[in-house]
Amino acid sequence: MESVMPSINLVAVGILFGILQIAILIGSLVAKKKTRSHRSILAFFAVLLLVQFEAFMNRSGFMAQVPHLLNIATPFIFLFGPLLYFHTQSNFSRNVSFKEVLLHITPFIAYFCYSFFFFLQPAAYKFNAFALSFQPDLQLIPTSVPFDSDPWNIQGIVVVELLALSILIYSIVNTYLISRFKRQAPEANLSWTNFVTCLSYLAGVILILSQGGLINGIRIFSTPIPAYSADLFATVATYAISIYILIHGIPQTIKAKKYYKSNVSNDQKQFLISRVLAEFEDKNLYMNPGFSLKVLSDKCKMSKHHISQVLNEELGMTFFELTNKYRIEEAKKLLSTSDDYIKMEQLAYQLGYKSKSTFFTAFKRSTDLTPLKYRQRLAV
């Protein structure tokens, strides 16, 4: 294989500094307490790091020394859109199910698996592919391939058009999410989500324009934007993100005021919460296995929405949290005053739980002890 002297040009230097910058950002996120929002953006930064690493290897010529790394980052670009979507959803305190995650990352999985037709090619073949794309003056190496590296002839379309289309579609979806959340919480500061969405739009547009709408090696239109713009954009985006975080800090989860449309006055809230708590003083109510928010609503002659609101705003608790609080306090009394050792399963049903495991989980969350250990501690 021909020896290639690396060329540390201005583009390669710029990308190298971007790699160092994104590594610092990743380190700062790893050091912080993790949230779903932080984990999604951490994954986003990791993909950004991988893309810049391959760009640096290509633009500097180092890829000729390790050709097996060629195109390793390309499938991961399919994760940019989904990770942006996951980050926005988690940033707005919304859960994304495992099935939804799997659905969104299916294009990445599919193309990553398809890429093994290329990944498993000999080093000489990959060296030639690198030379043709980045250093056409290099002498190609005669080689044979065990199988077609692109049997369905889709790489020429995927590498530009589908990747750009994926990024742009998710940018549009993100814009819709932002507008919907803004209607729900007009007081929320959405500058971070707007910022990364704008970067996403730019990424998709630049990816298409820098290649002239390339399809299977044929340019659809001429473009004044240099081909290396797509590689350099990841670095420019990294600098922009770094400046934003330096000024505003690492973005936190945005929480809308849950009941901002409610017209219940403070005096009404005090009256409503007193009625709810009065019903909770009736042990036969919350210790009934059939106790529910609807049952409480019927007893108080209040809507379920208003009960949830006053519990959340006046006590900082949900209906289930308040029910567990009363049940666990009753469990403590029974464990401390009962002369005979009541069975835990019997106690769970007596308190209104439908299973022993649910009771154990709720009790330990409240006391950091299991019911058995709590009773043993009382007996000492």
Image: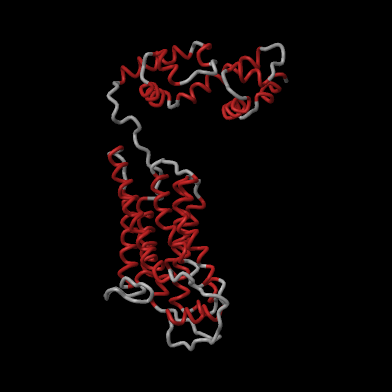
User: x%, y% of residue 216?
Assistant: 38, 74
Quarter holding the N terminus? bottom right
The quarter holding residue 358 reads: top right
User: x%, y% of residue 295?
Assistant: 45, 17
Query: Which coloring applies here?
Result: secondary structure
Using residue 145 as the reference point, say whether residue 170 is left or right of it.
left
The quarter holding residue 346 reads: top right
Q: Residue at x 54, y 68 (%)?
A: 116
User: x%, y% of residue 260?
Assistant: 30, 31
Q: Is residue 60 above or below residue 205?
A: below
User: x%, y% of residue 307?
Assistant: 39, 21
Quarter holding the C terminus? top right
Of 198 and 252, the residue lying toward us: 198
Of 220 and 242, the residue lying toward us: 220
Q: Mark yes or no: residue 196 visible.
A: no
Using residue 339 as the reference point, say whether residue 270 is left or right of it.
left
Q: Residue at x 48, y 46 (%)?
A: 99
Of 120 and 139, the residue lying toward us: 120
Using residue 339 as the reference point, say whether residue 151 is left or right of it.
left
Q: Residue at x 39, y 17 (%)?
A: 273
Q: Residue at x 40, y 56 (%)?
A: 81
Q: Mark yes or no: residue 162 visible.
A: yes
How many numbered discs sit on the rendered protein?
0
